[in-house]
Image (cartoon, helix red, strand yellow):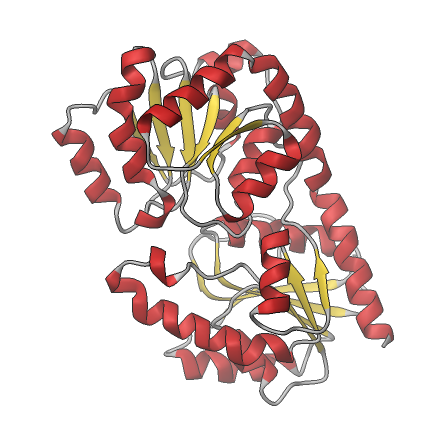
């Protein structure tokens, strides 16, 4: 059911990537309170849940901004999750309030040469437009600090990314065993690009196999560096130990089949797969960086590693496996506070307060 309050959720894509999935799930939850429309540049996968969806198909960035400005006249709330859309919303604002949930931008030091122009443009968009929104939302302590210190925002609230806690949960051992690909099975779901630290995981596998001969590394996702990673696996002869699953719409069975979620990313603004894995009762080993640190310290459900040192990773795996029940129990307890119903309720409060102003 909808109300007189109209909300537009703006994301770069529909049907691809963690941000898109979160915005889709959030939109479905908010549709019980508001008239919600999902707007994006491109639709990768057709919706299956009756969501009101608009694909803009812009010819270029300026066309994207122009179409967004026209749309904004029709909504009470423009809730943006795409930094490239933001300048088009804050310039010549329509009648509605603008909320920006900042997903973060990969720092230049973790950016490949091919991506530097796009990253610089993203920073320009953020620097210009973020201070002009009516409310900025930080998805982690790290991102809240960015909003305060880098962007000098005045109105800031912290609301985490969320997930359907009823969907992401542990299952019985029989279900898990069907997808089991080794012991321990290490799992990581991410865009297959350099800054996600996948090269380090691949190079670490020979060291891991020395202590855990039955271990496997299972990678879900796709990306521009996928061929490079697969070629490296072939060269070191680990095709049977490093498995590429490709992009998966449903990760729950693989989180359940895994023993440990390994997060080697050099940078993350929130890292939803950490929470998804923990919701399925899985301990997490993560690089000691940015939002990863917050999750591991606050949950006590995993281990942090500091360097690209395979032996440090092996020690972390050993610690997890020797104390598995403790870490697993802490994981599920921590994940429950990220239930999407809680997150949606926080956004309902933000929308209501802004409109009352």
User: Eyeballing the image, is 315 above or below 8?
Assistant: above
Percent across and percent down for residue 346 are: 77, 54
Residue reaching furthest bottom?
Answer: 92
Q: How many marks?
A: 0
Q: Between 14 and 233, which is closer to the camera in this rendering?
A: 233
Q: Where does residue 30 sit, x and y in percent of width and height?
A: 73, 55
Answer with left or right where residue 159 lies relative to residue 24.
right
The N terminus lies in quadrant: bottom right
Q: Is residue 57 visible?
A: no
Can you tell which quarter of the image residue 265 is in? top left
Judged left or right of residue 147, residue 13 is: left
* Residue at the far right in the pictured view: 356
Is 202 in front, or is 23? 202
**40 or 240, nearer to the observer:** 240
287 displayed left or right of 2: left
Can you tell which quarter of the image residue 332 is in? top right
Q: Quadrant of the C terminus?
A: bottom right
Q: What residue is shown at x 28% (from left), y 24% (from top)?
A: 205
Where residue 289 appears, x then y in whole percent? 48, 45
* Residue at (60, 27) in percent of width and height: 301
Q: Is residue 247 above or below residue 310?
A: below
326 or 228: nearer the eye? 326
């Amino acid at each position: 059911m909808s109300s007189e309050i109209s909300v537009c959720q703006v994301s770069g894509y529909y049907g691809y990537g963690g941000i898109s999935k979160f915005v889709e799930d959030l939109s479905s939850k908010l549709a019980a309170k508001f008239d919600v429309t999902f707007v994006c540049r491109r639709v990768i996968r057709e919706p299956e849940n009756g969501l009101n969806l608009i694909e803009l198909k812009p010819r270029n960035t300026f066309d994207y901004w122009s179409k967004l400005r026209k749309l904004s006249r029709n909504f009470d709330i423009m809730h943006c999750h795409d930094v490239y859309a933001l300048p088009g919303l804050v310039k010549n604002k329509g009648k509605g309030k603008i909320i920006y949930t900042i997903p973060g931008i990969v720092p230049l030091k973790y950016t490949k040469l091919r991506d530097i122009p796009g990253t610089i443009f993203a920073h320009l968009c953020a620097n210009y437009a973020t201070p002009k929104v009516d409310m900025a939302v930080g998805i982690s302590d790290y991102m809240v600090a960015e909003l305060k210190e880098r962007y000098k925002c005045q109105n800031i609230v912290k609301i985490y990314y969320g997930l359907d806690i009823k969907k992401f949960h542990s299952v019985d051992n029989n279900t898990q065993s069907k997808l089991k690909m080794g012991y321990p099975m290490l799992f990581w779901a991410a865009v297959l690009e350099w800054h996600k630290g996948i090269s380090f995981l691949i190079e670490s596998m020979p060291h891991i196999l020395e202590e855990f001969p039955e271990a496997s590394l299972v990678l879900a996702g796709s990306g521009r560096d996928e061929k490079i990673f697969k070629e490296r696996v072939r060269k070191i002869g680990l095709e049977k130990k490093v498995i590429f699953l490709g992009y998966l719409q449903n990760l729950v069975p693989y989180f359940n089949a895994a023993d440990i979620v390994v997060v080697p990313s050099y940078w993350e603004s929130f890292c939803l797969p950490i929470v998804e894995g923990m919701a399925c009762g899985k301990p997490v080993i993560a690089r000691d960086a940015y939002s990863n640190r917050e999750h591991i310290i606050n949950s006590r459900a995993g281990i942090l590693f500091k360097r690209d040192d395979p032996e440090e990773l092996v020690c972390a795996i050993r610690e997890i496996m020797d104390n598995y029940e403790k870490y697993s129990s802490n994981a599920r307890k921590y994940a429950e506070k990220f239930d999407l119903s809680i997150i949606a309720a926080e956004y309902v409060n933000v929308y209501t307060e802004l409109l009352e102003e």
